[in-house]
Amino acid sequence: MSIAVNMKKLTMVQAITEALKVVLEEDESVLVLGEDVGRNGGVFRATDGLFEMFGDERVIDTPLAESGLIGTSIGLAMNGFKPIVEIQFLGFIYPGFNQLITHATRIRTRTQSRYTVPMTIRVPYGAGVRAPEIHSDSTEALFAHIPGLKVVVPSTPHDAKGLLISSIRDPDPVLFLEPMKMYRTGKGDVPNGSYTIPLGKGYRRRSGHDISLFAWGAMVNVAEEAAEKAAAKGMECDVIDLRSLYPLDKELIAESVQKTGRAVIVHEAPSSGGVGSEVISVINDTSFLYMKSPIKKVTGYDAPVPLFTLEDDYLPDANKVLRAIEEAVRF
């Protein structure tokens, strides 16, 4: 009974708002900055109501200038604040890439840990919402390559709140990627109050012994749907939600494939140079002699996300993943 009382059903975007409210209440050094995050409540309303609760000195509307926004937040973070930056879409972050990669990720090394940058950058990303060009990019691999920057991707409302609170409390910069497709696609149980989920740790969404499926963000639902279809055909899938793309949970990856001997990796980003290739590298380094078949990837194409009529064809779906599962199991 106590568990039910301490839980409520929230969408992912509601869980993100809850996380922001929790940290703003418990720590006066936390600031929220971004374009339209104040009076308008953010482009997806993730900051809705926070301006009225905490005022314009803590929930701050900024100019349309990603480089200035990230650069200013680095300075704030080095001087005792914990800024939470909202970039409206991942495709808009590129003007701020230099500040993030050249400065935010290097301050700890540059100052021999005298200074850190406890900054969280929240960014909606991914396809499936019929957005215009540049709004649907899934370029997480660009950031997962950079030492000094953690890259986190929730797939459920519960994880969104717990991982975001952990990211804000982390002493180093975190890129927190929010799958737009999942903002309002369903509700899940979310604990009241403050709780955390460790960064760098994946989670087993479904246990199976025939093949491992690795996914993150909106693709976790796709992997779970494919696992249901595979189970109907007698193939049980171990579904792993990576949750953190840097650092990866190498131990969980190895544990899963050493149990199943097969793997399919699912991501909506283009295939070449994607994080899926790094997962394959981890499997080769830790578990090569356990493998019973070649590793499969089901991904987006090496092309920009197409406009509306072709968007569904671009994205991985459960049937594409099922075909990869069948090929691996029958190898």
Image (cartoon, rainbow, N blue to C red):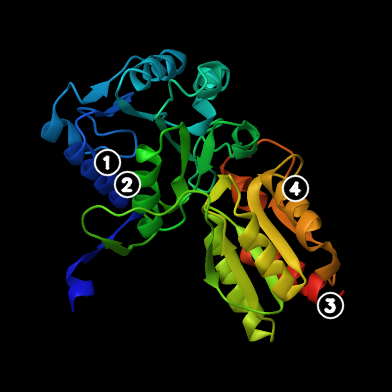
The reply, left or right, for residue 139 in relation to residue 189 is right
In-front residue for pair 189/106: 106
Q: Tell me which corner region of the image, top left, top right, bottom left or bottom right, holds residue 210.
A: bottom right
- Labelled disc at residue 16: 2
Precedes in sequence: disc 3 or disc 4:
4
- The nearer-to-camera label among 3 and 1 is 1
Give the quarter of the figure containing the N terminus.
bottom left
Residue 302, percent from left and from top = 75, 40
Q: CA distance from mark 4 to mark 1?
A: 33 Å
Q: Would you say the residues marked 2 and 3 are in contact, meaning their CB atoms lie under 8 Å apart? A: no
Residue at disc 1, secondary structure? helix
Of helix, strand and loop, which one carries label 3? loop
Q: 273 above or below 31?
A: below
Crowding around mark 4 (Cα neighbors within 10 Å: few <14, some 14 to 19, many 20+) is some
- Label 4, on which residue? 277
Q: What amino acid is at disc 4?
A: Ser
Residue of label 1: 20
Q: Quadrant of the C terminus?
A: bottom right
Residue wearing tag 3: 330
